[in-house]
Image: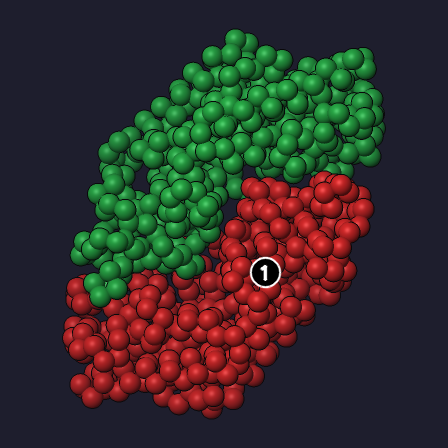
Chain colours: A red, B green
Amino acid sequence: MTLDDLPTPCLVLDLGLLRRNLAAMQAAVDRHPGLVLRPHLKTAKSREVARLASPDFGPVTVSTLAEARYFAEAGWRDQIYAVGIVPAKLDAVAALNEAGAAVKVITDDLDMARAIALHPGPIEALIEVDVGEGRGGIAPEDPLLEAIGAALGPRLAGVLSHSGHSYNGRSPEAMAEVAEAERLGITAAAARLRAAGLPVRIVSLGSSPTALHARRMDGVTDVRAGVYMFGDLFQAQLATHAVEDIALTVLASVIGRSEARNTLLLDAGALALSKDRSTQAAPRDYGFGLVLDRLGRPSLGEAIVARAYQEHGEVRNDAPLPALPLGTRLRVAPNHCCLTAAAHDRYYVVDGNAQVIAVWDRVNGW
Amino acid sequence: MTLDDLPTPCLVLDLGLLRRNLAAMQAAVDRHPGLVLRPHLKTAKSREVARLASPDFGPVTVSTLAEARYFAEAGWRDQIYAVGIVPAKLDAVAALNEAGAAVKVITDDLDMARAIALHPGPIEALIEVDVGEGRGGIAPEDPLLEAIGAALGPRLAGVLSHSGHSYNGRSPEAMAEVAEAERLGITAAAARLRAAGLPVRIVSLGSSPTALHARRMDGVTDVRAGVYMFGDLFQAQLATHAVEDIALTVLASVIGRSEARNTLLLDAGALALSKDRSTQAAPRDYGFGLVLDRLGRPSLGEAIVARAYQEHGEVRNDAPLPALPLGTRLRVAPNHCCLTAAAHDRYYVVDGNAQVIAVWDRVNGW
């Protein structure tokens, strides 16, 4: 089977680029002795990708109960479910843990901590700490920290932070500064809990930029990152990823062309690409994606998917577009690989050429 | 089963509102004697919704081969697959037609018309006509029209246009004008083909706004519309739909809250809601959706999902948000129902209260 036999639109994953991205992240983490990479599987949602990113069934991160179940069944026991837990989801977590997993939840809420402590099943929790992103979590200096820790008691597994604001950085130096602020915040929270006599086993922080650019990681036990596996056009503008290392693309067919308008239409629109516009505020706006040839090479110059209808992607370029016959296959590099991948139920895996060497599934939904 | 038993995030579809929306559209179409409504099933992608929208297995529209197959197997024979066809997809269409369906394809390309004419299987095509949207299709006055019609020969089924630019209208009058321009364009194309001795059985146009607001439909055989079934916050600003008639919402749980920031966090983020920002340029910007209570009532005032992370939706409001306990269930009305629905594999059906009366599947992907 080759790229020409696939139904379009579909996801194409380049194995060589994936391996290169995984190795680069592992090397970045290995700069810090004792630090463990806890891959976030919310991007890939695939056992086969997890087997490469976490070959020894080490610690991982998930974002849905569906992922927790799918990866637990495949052998990844040590998980952090890194989205704030609610009472109605505790039974499902406990059931996974009773079957042998060790899925840890996160919370920043005192009532929730009490509910976790009282749950009859085996559930541990990390306290979510806000290190400046301002989304969830409590500040390291908030006295609520010890109160939640005490409420969790022996069910306290540690502390967790997420530096989503590292994405605001535009240089390795700026991201290293965010990473260091995150490290200072999360280790301060851990120290305060320990000073109160509470056990803190896990001190977890992360995002792909902080994992790649942090200068120090002392006091941190594990770092979470996910998007580094595939990369995308947004990450490429954070100096964390090169455009030519983007491992995930959408294969599409040319379904229309207009010489007068200098446009091509692809059968990859808003559903196949997502409506993520994260490059809008970046130095270079790629519309809904950068158009590459069938082998992933930039042979169409600066052509981008400028408009995305439900099933139509309209390609535009400043230079004249080639008169490609209908049915010509092209690839589109995504703005945000997590969202683009989520519209598809499988990966068609290639390795630098047109041969499809494997088909890997994904666990979508909740 | 009630709304409190459902896993969140999930799709909730209100049957009473769906029925009301279907009846309103049917009444609008019935103003034009002889005009047939050809529901576009790309929004609902559900047999159960199709049974209500097209109870006699009448003509329908689809946007993917997966929909064509799913609806053909369920009994809807007369379909238009309204996305430009490519050679590699002809065999799949022919196989459906050999099994009893009558899936018609569309094209605006002479080479493609020849390939359709030469295909050994039973395939008819409509010529896509551009009535001003400037996406696909050929202009009604372009001589290519007759050339494509002649190339299709006995396989020519008719002409089709889409007035996506009707969405630029902001009043019923503006949309009625776009609808009339579309009618003049598509009937002119039909007349030119007939004058050339070519048979034109189907003259199909559409979009929900044109179907609702057109003053005249003479010369048109069928009108296509899809989003009217559910409605959304974007449609509500086109005067084609009331906010209180939006039948589709996302049920979510409160997973975080910050009094200091006056925010709530929901477990419905970019994946559950989509990153569609179509209300951004509308009179009222709803962020990523309008926040309603568990029964779909606007009891949180003007609260919207202001930021959407992969699995987190951050709710903001100018007025203080209530201190809701974690686990509280809310509903989010979407900007664009087609894209929001596509992230989910099923509908939980209610009818004005918290009781779940049915679960309906969807056919996602391609």
Structural crowding at the residue carrying mark 1, measured as other residues with C-alpha within 10 Å and reported as few (<14), some (14–19) or many (≥20): some
Chain under numbered label 1? A
Measuring from the top left, give residue B186's x and y in whole percent: 66, 22
Q: Which is nearer the eye, A298 or B328?
A: A298
The number of numbered discs placed on residues in the rendered structure image is: 1
**Which residue does the numbered mark 1 point to in the structure image?**
A285
Residue B97 in sight from this viewpoint: no
Measuring from the top left, give residue A87's x and y in whole percent: 23, 57
User: Does residue A68 appear to the left or right of B225 in the view shown?
Assistant: left
Residue B314 in sight from this viewpoint: yes
Measuring from the top left, give residue B57's x and y in whole percent: 52, 19
Which residue is painted at 77% across and 51% down in the image?
A321
Quarter-wise, where is residue B188 in the image? top right
Quarter-wise, where is residue A295 in the image? bottom right
Which residue is painted at 74% across and 46% down in the image?
A262
Q: Which is nearer the eye, B132 or B253?
A: B132
User: Does residue B320 appear to the left or right of A98 in the view shown?
Assistant: left
**Residue type at mark 1?**
Asp
Can you say whether B173 is above or below A189 in the image?
A: above
Can you say whether B129 is above or below A31 in the image?
A: above
Measuring from the top left, give residue B216's x and y in whole percent: 54, 15
User: Does residue A218 appear to the left or right of A151 in the view shown?
Assistant: right
Can you say whether A329 is above or below A352 in the image?
A: above
Q: Is mark 1 on a helix, strand or loop?
A: loop
Quarter-wise, where is residue B292 in the image? top left
Which residue is painted at 61% across and 24% down in the image?
B182
Can you say whether B284 is above or below B160 in the image?
A: below
Which residue is painted at 70% across and 35% down in the image?
B85
